Image (tube, rainbow, N blue to C red):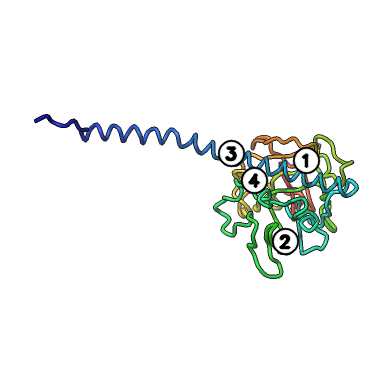
Amino acid sequence: MQRRAAFTIVELLVVISIIVLLIALLLPALNLARTNAQRAICLSNMRQQHEAQTGYATDNNGRFAPRNENSPDYQRQQGAQLNTVHAMRDDYIGNTDVMVCPLVAKVSSQPLREYQRHDWLSGSGAYGGWDTNAAYVYTAYMWMAGFNGGPGGTVTYLNGEPPAPTAMTDTASDTTFITHRLNYYNANSLHEVSHGGRGLFQTATPYDDWQTTDQPITFADGHSVVRSEDDIEPRMVINGNYPASPGFPGTYLW
């Protein structure tokens, strides 16, 4: 009788060890590829948002959609009748998926999932996404077009940042149009709503201790860049600037 060939236990262990090693080597590359794909989706979202805003302006004598918010990542605040969502939903933003950044939406420290499209706080002060009737519509994306700081808001721009445009005639190639929120308003409170960030309400966290890895920006002429952590700096102040004079909403970085 012929003896049937078979793997020995030692050979099996060697094969398993090789497979485990290959997986360990490939996982970082796979994770990087997934992150890059999600970053590409985010930039595509921003291009579509840019087209929607400029399309609205083209149809409305060059003026951007009405704003009544004290922070540019709100598209509706306090249920104001004049708001971006009412003006642009369906006709200009038909697919509200473009209002959700896939990198920000998976932030595990935000159990209420406020970056999705549904309600995440109910009642008269409800917060939600573009598919809701919430009084406050908040997204990860800051829309600078038409932003003026809201009623009584004082906006100051830093480091040569051009002011937010109120109409198409105010735009230049380097005018920031859309980005994410990275914002501090006192020594230990940080809104870190950008790629790699930890989300809202990072209390007891010094403002210069963010974990954001990169910040995407789309400019008024439609081109986009992704700034690395080292290139992010304060660019806009609303009603106060920490550490000189803390106030809310405070200082925004991109």
The earlier-in-sequence mark between 2 and 4 is 2
Q: Which amino acid is tagged 4?
A: Ser
Q: Is residue 7 left or right of residue 144?
A: left
Q: Name the front one of labels 3 and 1.
A: 3
Inter-mark Cα distance, 2 to 1? 23 Å
Q: Quadrant of the C terminus?
A: top right
Q: Is residue 44 above or below residue 155?
A: above
The label number, if any, that marks residue 37 in the structure image: 3
The earlier-in-sequence mark between 2 and 3 is 3
Mark 1 neighbour class, 10 Å CA radius: few under 14, some 14 to 19, many 20 or more: many
The label number, if any, that marks residue 194 in the structure image: 4
* Residue found 78% across the figure and 48% down from its top: 237
The label number, if any, that marks residue 136 in the structure image: 2
Inter-mark Cα distance, 3 to 1? 23 Å
Q: Name the front one of labels 2 and 4.
A: 2
Inter-mark Cα distance, 4 to 3? 16 Å
Q: Which amino acid is tagged 2?
A: Tyr
- The x, y position of residue 7, in whole percent, is 22, 33
* Residue found 64% across the figure and 54% down from its top: 115
* Residue found 8% across the figure and 30% down from its top: 1
Q: Which amino acid is tagged 1?
A: Thr
Q: State the SS at label 2.
A: strand
The label number, if any, that marks residue 176 in the structure image: 1
